[in-house]
Amino acid sequence: MTESHVENAVAARIAAARWRAAENKRRREELAEARRRGLARRHAQKLRNLHPPTGNVPTGQQEPAADPAQPAASTTEAVPAPQNAKVEQTSTDRRSQ
């Protein structure tokens, strides 16, 4: 028995549909893998931004170590308030009076 022209055309269509489905599946898998890699890279960068590394500063950029023989200098000096300074009322203070 010989196959008819119609059966050959149907078989070709089925084969083409299977090939397209396989190509679409392969393409989706590649895109999904690229997306996973991109999301992992983005997540890692976000973590690096949230928690910058400590102790990895190049030697030229490190702050000099304090000399234990010298007293520690205060970075903020306490400024005494004037004795007769009038305290300014805020809007919430005025409403409560």
Image: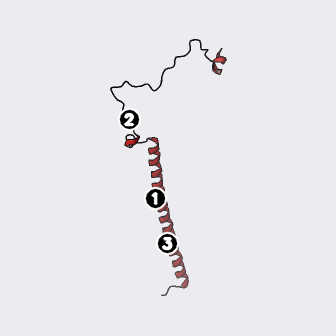
Task: Inspect the image, locate mark 2, and give the three-letter code of the amino acid beneath it.
Answer: Pro
Kindly identify which residue carries mark 1. 33
In the rendered image, which quarter is residue 85 located in? top right
In the rendered image, which quarter is residue 83 located in? top right
Crowdedness of circle 2 by 10 Å Cα count: few (<14), some, many (20+)? few
Q: Is residue 11 above or below residue 55?
A: below
Kindly identify which residue carries mark 3. 19
From the top left corner, tell me how far across and down residue 11 is, in percent.
Answer: 51, 78
- Secondary structure, mark 2, is loop
From the top left corner, tell me how far across and down residue 69 is, in percent.
Answer: 33, 26
Residue lying at 49% horizontally and 87% vertically, measured from the top left: 2
Q: Which is more foreground, mark 3 or mark 1?
A: 1
Distance from the alpha carbon under mark 3 to that under mark 1: 21 Å
Label at residue 62: none
Distance from the alpha carbon under mark 1 to that under mark 2: 47 Å
Is residue 56 visible in this depiction of the protein? no
- Secondary structure, mark 3, is helix
Q: Which is more foreground, mark 1 or mark 2?
A: 2
Residue nearest the observer in this picture, 83 or 22: 83
Is residue 59 visible in this depiction of the protein? yes
Kindly identify which residue carries mark 2. 64
Q: Is residue 70 above or below residue 31?
A: above
Residue lying at 45% horizontally and 55% vertically, measured from the top left: 37
From the top left corner, tell me how far across and down residue 56 is, in percent.
Answer: 38, 43
Residue nearest the observer in this picture, 31 or 93: 93
